[in-house]
């Protein structure tokens, strides 16, 4: 066959195949429409039975025997309902489901079937405080590559109070190149909030990489544990920019006055990100002693530093506002604008 | 056979081979896109329900500034803003930029939301027409309205970027509707890969025929107008096939101006939107590619098919023709400014694939195809070409078109299933076949007009007449 003939007949064959595919999809849609309708009814029924069980109608559990064999359906219903309640009602529901063998099915589902189903199973296991569930989640985590599933499994382990050691998690995240993922950031924050001591040990460990320490610094700030202040201050002068930024932001979030030397030093840092974060920290802590440097920073070449400095000064009370009023009257246009707008945003007249 | 006739046949065959070859190459690219899109769709992250999405992503989601430029939209602006303010996202602000409207857009907003002038400290790294005032709403802390002198959409977006403070901004049209969880879905690449992700596009779909209440699509339907139906298939092909495919290999050169998320700092570094162009959305994405490749930094320009922005499609040939000519002019302007990336190895796939595709499909494609419609049947009728040439031309101009359109629809049904009824699929399949006979050719004529306007340096946007969403039912 010539090339021209091949083009013609090739297009006819492909066109016919595309139309046949479409016909098959339309037929499948008709079948699926019925199945989806049934699924919707099953979901509604399962939610109703869950509510009855939580209300104390134990006999409702018998009616769950059939539908609860479908692991994904059950997992999604658990996430819908059990995530909203605590206490006796939740215990009633989880013990009824455990009695029906739901945990076992969810554990098996961790390794089988669609990705969405595996993730739902991992999340649903979080409501069953059973060592076997934690073990199954750890096993699944050890072999799973999908980041979304891994985060779901980690969160479930956290909820079961069976999270892996922080060091192991950080090393794993770094080795997979996932240290930037904000999803992992929230997992690490939750772990550090539960065990700040463990996080401080990692942060101080000379064997910890800069990436690991940067992640932990951020989480320590959000933990609200003041024991982190000396460690963060000690780490602040280190050369790595990301670590310096993380430390000064964490000190700002902790808002402890002991962070004053680091914040004052940060206001003169070479990196604008550190200067801006230091200005923000000064405002949060209420460091009146930083006011002269903050006024100087109103002339900074980077807008974010000027903006954060203005914000910080306006947060320092009378002395800060007085400094802003003075700055709003100077000749330097950039300083005047930064100061007057900082006052205006606070609703204070210049 | 005389020498003259032999020469004539030789010329006719050479022209036919050129036309058929260009068409075959174009279709080959489409088939590659279809394959890439199929792989991308099958490997995409799961699509959880809104409540699950919130639980999984809300805590990690960065703040977003929604930038909605508005020009003479007094009739619809209040409903549009209400719809934006009711989006489900943990931290966002809506910045409406009134681009010097000559109607009562600003007054309507002031009255509806009780706006009052506020002072706001902002940097001015991007140029734009002067800002006349900034307004805030006492009972809607998320809403900021910027009133500025008229300067066009790109100019208004630059003003919005300057005034915003969130690390990510979402550019959109004030007259489009976002699904309530569109931001939460679109932000996923920024959450999962925040260092590399600099821009993400979402799908734009046709709202004609859908049931819309209070600024939300509550039931997906098909347009009654045949012209809007044709555009429904066209949008599926453009978004689910082309954009998904190019994003898969990081060669996406356009994110629709109706819905795109961008990392603010990188956009500022790239110089923001180029003013005085009608293809500012494409131009920005290309500038971002160039910035990152010039700096040799790893980056990602992504496309997420699930977050949906609904837009109203024109239902008159005149308005649609103007829109398509303008779009084509925008592509040509971008190509003119950045054609050199095709010849510089450091631009990699952007030049080798993205721009070669624009050259072949957008610039040369319409001209060659229309030439083929005129010459090849004529050559065949005159006996200069055999029937094989005519059939091969029909294959590359019609039959492959059916394959691509039906293929895109099949992808939609296999992976997303947004059309609720089997009947919809049946109608769309018929439309996917029919669009190749008449509509496709008309589109090429509009593109040629765009080419002509570009050569004449026309900067007109033309009037986009819309019925408004309140009329949809």
Image (cartoon, coloured by chain):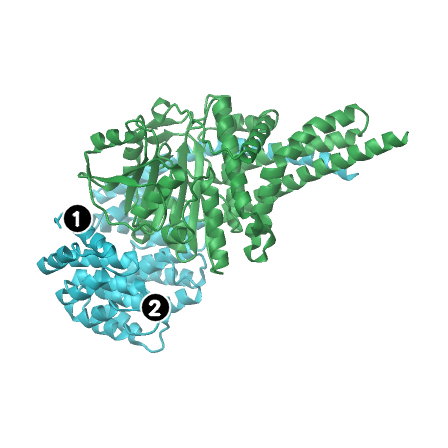
Q: Nearer the viewer, mark 1 or mark 2?
A: 1
**Chain to which the residue tagged by mark 1 belongs:** A
Q: Point out which mark residue A241 bears.
A: 2
Q: Position of residue A132 (x, y in %)?
A: 34, 61
Looking at the rendering, in which quadrant would you find the N terminus of chain B? top right
Q: Quadrant of the C terminus of chain B?
A: top left
Residue nearer the viewer, A128 or B307 = B307
What residue occupies the far front of the structure in this picture? A331
Looking at this view, is A296 or B220 the one in front? A296
Kindly indicate whether the residues beneath marks 1 and 2 are on one polypeptide chain.
yes
Residue A68 shown left or right of residue A89 in the figure? right
Work out which residue is located at the far right of the displayed protein and give it: B1
- The residue depicted at 20 percent of the width and 54 percent of the height is A336
Q: CA distance from mark 1 to mark 2?
A: 33 Å
Residue B334, position as x, y percentages in the image: 52, 43
Q: In this picture, is B265 found above or below B282?
A: below
Q: What hue represents chain A?
A: cyan
Chain B colour is green
Q: Is B41 displayed left or right of B60 in the figure?
A: right
């Amino acid at each position: 066959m010539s090339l021209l003939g091949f083009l013609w007949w090739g297009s006819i064959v492909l066109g016919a195949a595309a139309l046949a595919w479409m016909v098959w999809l339309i037929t499948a849609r008709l079948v699926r429409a019925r199945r989806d309708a049934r699924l919707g009814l099953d979901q509604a029924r399962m939610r109703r039975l869950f509510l009855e069980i939580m209300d104390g109608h134990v006999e409702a559990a018998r009616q769950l025997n059939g539908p609860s064999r479908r692991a994904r359906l059950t997992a999604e219903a658990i996430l819908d309902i059990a995530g909203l309640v605590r206490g006796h009602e939740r215990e009633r529901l989880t013990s009824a489901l455990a009695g029906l063998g739901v945990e076992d099915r969810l554990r098996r589902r961790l390794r089988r079937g669609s990705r969405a189903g595996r993730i739902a199973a991992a999340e649903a296991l979080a409501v069953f405080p059973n060592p076997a569930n934690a073990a199954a989640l750890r096993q699944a985590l050890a072999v799973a590559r999908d980041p979304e599933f891994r985060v779901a499994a980690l969160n479930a382990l956290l909820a079961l109070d069976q999270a892996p050691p922080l060091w192991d998690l950080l090393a794993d995240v770094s080795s997979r190149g996932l240290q930037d993922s904000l999803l992992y950031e929230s997992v690490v924050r939750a772990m550090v909030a539960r065990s700040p001591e463990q996080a401080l040990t990692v942060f101080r460990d000379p064997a910890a990489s800069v990436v690991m320490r940067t992640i932990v610094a951020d989480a320590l700030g959000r933990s609200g544990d003041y024991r982190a202040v000396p460690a963060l201050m000690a780490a602040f002068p280190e050369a790595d920019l990301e670590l310096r930024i993380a430390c000064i932001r964490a000190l700002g979030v902790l808002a402890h006055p002991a962070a004053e030397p680091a914040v004052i030093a940060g206001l003169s840092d070479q990196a604008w990100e550190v200067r801006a974060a230091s200005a923000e920290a000064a405002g949060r802590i209420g460091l009146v002693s930083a006011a002269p440097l903050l006024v100087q920073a109103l002339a900074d070449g980077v807008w974010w530093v000027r903006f954060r400095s203005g914000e910080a000064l306006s947060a320092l009370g009378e002395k800060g506002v007085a400094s802003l009023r003075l700055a709003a009257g100077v000749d330097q246009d950039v300083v005047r604008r930064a100061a007057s707008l900082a006052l205006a945003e606070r609703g204070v007249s210049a | 056979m005389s020498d003259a006739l032999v020469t004539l046949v030789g010329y006719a065959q050479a022209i036919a081979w050129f036309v058929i070859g260009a068409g075959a190459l174009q279709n080959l690219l489409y088939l590659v896109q279809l394959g890439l899109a199929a792989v991308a769709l099958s490997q995409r992250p799961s699509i959880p329900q809104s409540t699950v999405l919130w639980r999984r992503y809300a805590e990690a989601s960065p703040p977003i500034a929604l930038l909605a430029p508005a020009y003479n939209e007094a009739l619809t602006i209040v409903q549009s803003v209400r719809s934006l303010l009711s989006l489900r996202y943990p931290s966002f602000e809506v910045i409406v930029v009134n681009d010097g409207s000559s109607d009562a857009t600003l007054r309507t907003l002031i009255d509806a939301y009780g706006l009052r002038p506020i002072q706001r400290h902002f940097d001015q790294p991007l140029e734009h027409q002067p800002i006349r005032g900034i307004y805030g709403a006492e009972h809607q802390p998320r809403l900021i309205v910027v009133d500025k002198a008229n300067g066009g959409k790109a100019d208004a977006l630059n003003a919005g970027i300057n005034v915003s403070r969130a690390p990510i901004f979402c550019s959109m049209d004030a007259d489009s509707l976002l699904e309530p969880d569109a931001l939460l879905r679109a932000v996923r690449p920024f959450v999962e890969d925040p260092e590399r992700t600099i821009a993400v596009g979402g799908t734009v779909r046709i709202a004609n025929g859908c049931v819309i209440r209070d600024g939300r699509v509550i039931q997906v339907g098909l347009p009654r107008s045949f012209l809007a139906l044709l555009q429904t298939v066209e949008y599926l092909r453009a978004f689910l096939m082309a954009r998904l495919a190019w994003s898969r290999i990081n060669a996406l050169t356009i994110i629709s101006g109706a819905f795109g998320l961008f990392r603010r700092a990188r956009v500022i570094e790239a110089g923001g939107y180029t003013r005085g162009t009608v293809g500012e959305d494409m131009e920005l994405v290309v500038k971002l590619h160039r910035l990152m490749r010039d700096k040799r930094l790893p980056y990602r320009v992504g496309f997420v098919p699930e977050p949906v922005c609904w837009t109203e499609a024109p239902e008159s040939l005149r308005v649609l023709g103007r829109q398509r000519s303008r779009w084509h002019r925008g592509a040509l302007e971008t190509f003119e400014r950045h054609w050199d990336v095709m010849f510089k190895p450091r631009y990699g796939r952007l030049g080798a694939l993205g721009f070669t595709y624009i050259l072949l499909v957008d610039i040369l494609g319409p001209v060659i195809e229309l030439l083929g419609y005129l010459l090849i049947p004529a050559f065949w009728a005159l006996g200069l070409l055999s029937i094989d040439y005519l059939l091969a031309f029909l294959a590359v101009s019609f039959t492959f078109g059916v394959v691509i359109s039906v293929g895109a629809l099949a992808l939609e049904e296999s992976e997303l299933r947004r059309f609720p009824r089997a009947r919809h699929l049946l109608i769309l399949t018929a439309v996917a076949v029919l669009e190749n006979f008449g509509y496709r050719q008309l589109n090429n004529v509009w593109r040629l007009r765009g080419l002509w306007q570009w050569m004449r340096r026309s900067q007109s946007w033309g009037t986009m007449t819309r019925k408004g969403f309140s009329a949809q039912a």
